[in-house]
Image (cartoon, rainbow, N blue to C red):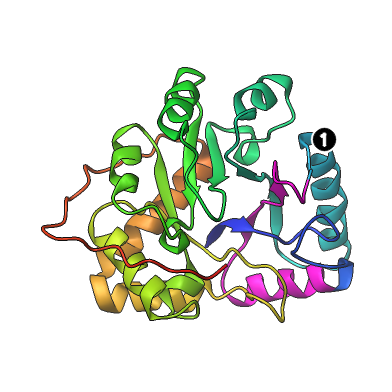
Amino acid sequence: MIDIHCHILPELDDGAADLRQALRMAEEAVAEGIHFVFATPHHGSETYDNDAMKVYRAVRDFNRELVERGIPLHVMPGQEVRAHAALIDEILSGAVLTLNDGPYLLMELPPTCIPPYMEELLHELRVLRVIPIIAHPERHPDIGERMAQWVELGALGQVNAHSLLGLFGKRVQKNAFSLCRQNLVHFIASDGHRPDFRPIRLQAAFQLVEGQLGEHYARHYRDNAQKLLDGETIDAQLPVRPSRRWFVRWNGK
């Protein structure tokens, strides 16, 4: 199994605080049946600045630790990049890192608002042939029906395992499953942070999706993660418009 969103690298953000925690997360991932993880430290926010070279070095060093300890996990470089006005300039400068240097960029929204330039940003990314994956849209209080518009503009969606499992509350869980049913979700990822805070729970999330939505949904998300790893094109299905308002506001963090 493949996890495309994980804060496993030590001492870079609010994920693994040190090497010991990072190694525990690696062991958790293997126990979950995961053998490939995209390391996605936060970048571009007011709090965290993890440019591409910093991430490359951290991934190299951590993979060495995994090999030395015989942990059968391979980590690929990436970032969880905050959508901001200077994002295109950062991409052109080489500071922003796509997932394993492929066409896909994991992008999160500011926690309290949607940038007014969001549609323009998506258009500019498309011109650069960069495909944004919107991280955990189910948790954003203002996203409403905007996600369908963004998928139509070429974006993809990733929901968190913890959201599907109800660990952010019933409202976020309802939003996550609604996004799935509308073809607005293309990946499930752990968004794992630390063993004691958002541990990796990917297996349980896939089992729940299979039980609630059907095996074909779970297979679709697994296949997309494999395509991402292999650098292949992911074909997004057309969004299914809901017949009534479906999104429930969530005021958590």
Corner quadrant of residue 210 = bottom left
Residue at the outermost left position: 243
Q: Secondary structure at mark 1?
A: helix
Residue 62, horizontal then vertical, whole percent: 83, 55
Q: Is residue 204 above or below residue 79?
A: below
Corner quadrant of residue 250 = bottom left
Q: Is residue 63 above or below residue 213?
A: above
**Residue identifier under label 1:** 53
Residue 167 is at least partly visible in this image: yes
Residue range highlighted in magenta: 21-48
Residue 113 relative to residue 192: left or right? left
- The residue at 78%/37% (across/down) is 51
Residue 236, horizontal then vertical, whole percent: 30, 41
- The residue at 67%/35% (across/down) is 97
Query: Is 39 included in the stretch rendered in magenta?
Result: yes
For the C terminus, the quadrant is bottom right
Q: Amino acid at mark 1?
A: Met
